Image (cartoon, grey):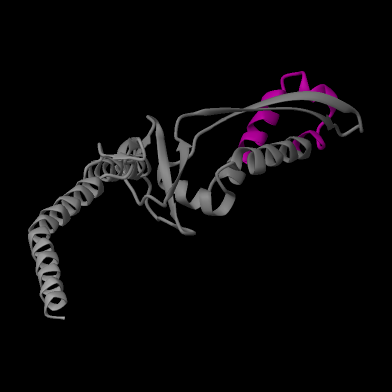
Amino acid sequence: RDDVSDWSSDVCSSDLSRVRRAIPNVSPGLAQLKAVMRTALHDDDSDVDGGKFPFGSKGVMAGAGGCCCFLLIIIAATTFRTIPPASVGVVTTFGSTSEGTLQSGIHVTNPFAKVTIFPTKTVLLEENSAVPTREGLVVNLEVAVLYHIVPEKASHIFLALGGNFQDTYLKPQLASAVRGVTGSVAAEALYNSTREEIQVKLQQTMKDIMDP
């Protein structure tokens, strides 16, 4: 029994010595493993299953920088507005229309605002229609009107008539005025010297319609 007891003690002591000798080698191994994991998480060039790690810190920063540049371009494009020469702009923001107008040039506006352009130069409006005369005859008549808007009244015109006021308001009014004038004169008056009187009457009628 004493021999067996001595042999068991020798074995236990030998095994314990091996474990103690192995412990110092375990710590460097764990430290190396931690370093490898840390490198894989932070280095975008590290290999993962034979491929590149796709979401490294450098890639995230590059993506964020690209998004910021894209947003800045969008904000600049929607904030800076250019009004062409001989035009004014009416600004509408969330259904509210500004009282003043933007003159020709570059302006800084709300990114969510809409700018409607109104030309202030002289515009030619033509109308070709069949109109009745006093005798009940139908005559084909071509009428041309030159007009321009008052820049200070652009906001009022936009609120009252809209941006496409020429098609929705002026053309129907011109056709109605022509029929009203020609309906009270004879057909021959449209071709003789009295035509100038008809022209003056039509001009006055259109002036009353177009004056704000």
Q: Is-magenta flag for residue 182? A: yes
Nearest to the observer: residue 56 or residue 67? 56
Task: Give the residue at x 20% y 47%.
Answer: 36
Quarter assignment of residue 169? top right
Q: Main secondary structure of the magenta part?
A: helix
Task: Give the residue at x 39% y 31%.
Answer: 84
Nearest to the observer: residue 114 or residue 177? 114
| Number of dots carrying numbers | 0
Q: Is-magenta flag for residue 4? A: no
Left or right: 139 with respect to 121? right
- Percent of width and height locating residue 117: 46, 39
Task: Give the residue at x 25% y 36%.
Answer: 45
Relative to 123, is 73 above or below? below
Nearest to the observer: residue 126 or residue 180? 126
- Percent of width and height locating residue 133: 85, 32
Relative to 146, is 2 above or below? below
Nearest to the observer: residue 161 or residue 96? 96
Which span is picked out in magenta? 181-206
